[in-house]
Every structure is written in C-alpha cells, then in structure tokens.
Amino acid sequence: MDLVLLERALAHRGEPAYRARQVWEWTARGTASYEEMTTLPKALRSALAEEVPFSTLEVVTERESRDGTLKVLFRTHDGHPVEAVLMRYRDGRRSVCLSAQSGCPLTCTFCATGAMRFGRNLTAFEIVDQALHFRRLDTLNHVVYMGMGEPFLNLDAVLDSARHLPDLGITHRRTTISTVGWMPGLRRFVDEVEQPIRLALSIHAADPALRSELMPVNDRYPLGDVLAECRRYFALRRRKVFVEYVLLAGVNDSPAAARALAAVLDPKAFKVNLIPYNPTGMYEGSSRAAIEGFKAVLERARIPATVRLTRGRDIEAACGQLAATR
C-alpha cells in the first residue's frame, strides 16, 4: 500500500489525520481489503477502493513447495517482475525473503537473478507489499532482504520499508539485510543505521581471483576493504556479521578454500552460514561430505559455522534461484 498516496487521498477528501493510521493498522494486521476495515465509514471504504490500490503489486503466480515454502511472482504497475518467498519452519519461524530490485545488475555467476535483465529499484511500498501479501496468509516474525537485487543499491527504500516491519510483527532484531559488498551502501549502513538490523555479507570465496570470477563486484570493491567495513560495524554495534557462503563442487569447497576463509575472518565478529548450492544451471552442488569437511575446518579455526537448511528447492524458491520465470 502506498501510504503517501493514501494520505494524499484522505487529505483531499477532508478526512482527519487519524484515518491514515487506522487504514495502516488494519493493513499491517493482515486485513485483505478496505471492506474489512469496519472502523472506517462505509462510504470512505468504497472511495478508497477506487482511489488507492490496496497493493502496489499484482500477484501473477503462487507456488507451494512440499516443505511448505511459498513463492510468489508479483508484477509492478509498470510491468516489472518481482519474486518473494515465505519460509515456514517447524519451530514456528515464519521468515520472508524480500526483493529490493527487479532483477540485479551485479551478475554473480551462480545466481539466477543475476542472469535476468535488470529492471529497476523497487519503492519502499513495493517492498513492504511483498511482506504484507504473506502477512495476509500467516503470522510473520523474520525478514531477510536476500531476494532479487542488491539491497545496498537501493538503501533508502530498503530502510524505509524496514521501518514499517515492526507493525507486521517483525522486530528490527529479526531483520537482516544482505549485501555482496556494495561499499557506498555498506558505509552508510554502518554510519547511519541505529536500529539493531542485522548485516549479512555474501563472500563465496576468500581468494581474490576466484571471488572476482564468481562475483564481479569484487574487482570494484575488494573483499579486504569490505571486511574492514564489517569489522567497523561490529566495533560500533557489537553485532556479529553473518557470512553467506554458497558451496560449489570443485570450485570453492576444498579444505584449502575453507582455511583461506578462516584466515580472513575474526571469530568474534563473524558467523558463517554455509549454503548448499541450489542448481541454476552453471555449477554442481557440493557433496554432503565436502560440506561437513568445510565446516570442520572452520570450527577448528574457532569460526562459528552452520549449514543452512534448504527450503523450496523444488519450486525454484531457494537461495540463488529467484529468476521470475513463472
């Protein structure tokens, strides 16, 4: 819901300021339409339905995985595709993976989104509307900005959208923004963001040449500089940085690669999430033995490490698979 458009429409009709708060409170609780907002006069509900679209996004398709994960393909008012994912866990977690852009201009080779044609940055309300769609289906308690796009290329809209999430039941401490290391946005995040929003960094290789091959952004913003900024974040905020590391068979999953990763990470400041590769056509995923071996090397170096539970692979909803193909 575009709250700026809502406030403008209400002001034009001479409605009191509290009407906008009423509409937003109903929407954030998961209400599916203006008609359900029974504290508003019926005539106003009808007028808003005509003047202010209930969502800035149109649902194109929904697909549900065998594990309960739900992937939704949206389309913006100007035709750009956007995908978002709701992950349901047995322990009660309901985590939404939000997109900050339609497509991504940074072309990481293992990521399906990077192979898409880049569309544009999303507005804050287009980002919030992804979460609101899932809020109408379930209770939410976690958000990760790890869907389509590089969040730090659209930082203002991402942060504006994050300010609305507590109204949906998602605290800042349960909100994580992921980056490949886009330094201008990362510096701003470290310097300006006081809320306890978590930071995640996609590394995928500690060797500079290999990282540049996998992630061209490394040529522009080398990993050493990015890690220094992450250490500054830890020093200022006292919150660990999550390191995302996708394991690719025969590419970055050797014991030597694990030792190289351990060598550049401070155990006090970083925690590693090892991600089994979800096939997108270019690489093969690492074996279970290789993943466990990689994790063991990190643990011997006292680097905290976990293996992420893969969700939604059968519907192309897992990490790196969002490509808005259907």
Image (spheres, rainbow, N blue to C red):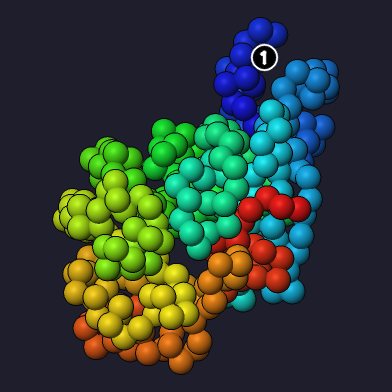
The quarter of the picture where the N terminus appears is top right
Let me know if residue 261 appears in the view. Answer: yes
The answer to which of 60 and 94 lies nearer the viewer is 60
Q: Is residue 39 left or right of residue 298?
A: right
Q: Residues within 10 Å of mark 1 (few under 14, many from 20)?
A: some
- Say above or below: 70 vs 136: below
**Looking at the picture, which amino acid does disc 1 mark?**
Ala
Q: Residue 151, how many percent across, how many down?
A: 44, 44
When asked about the image quadrant of residue 271, the answer is bottom left
Which residue does the numbered mark 1 point to in the structure image?
A: 9
In the image, 117 versus 290, the foreground residue is 117
Residue drawn at the location 47% of the way across and 34% of the way down: 157
The quadrant where residue 299 appears: bottom left
Q: In this rendering, is residue 144 above or below 296?
A: above
Side of 32 relative to 97 (left or right): right
* Residue at the (41%, 39%) spot, across then down: 153
Image point (70%, 71%), residue name: 314
Q: Is residue 38 above or below residue 15?
A: below
Q: Position of residue 313 (x, y in %)?
A: 65, 70
Q: In the depicted view, which residue is nearer to us: 203 or 240? A: 203
Nearer to the camera, 314 or 238: 314
User: In this rendering, would 43 be left or right of 182?
Assistant: right
Q: Where is residue 133 shown, x and y percent of the image?
A: 69, 46
Quick check: can you spot residue 18? no
Q: What kind of element bears circle 1?
A: helix
Instruction: Please determine whether, in this image, residue 56 is positioned above or below residue 322.
Output: above
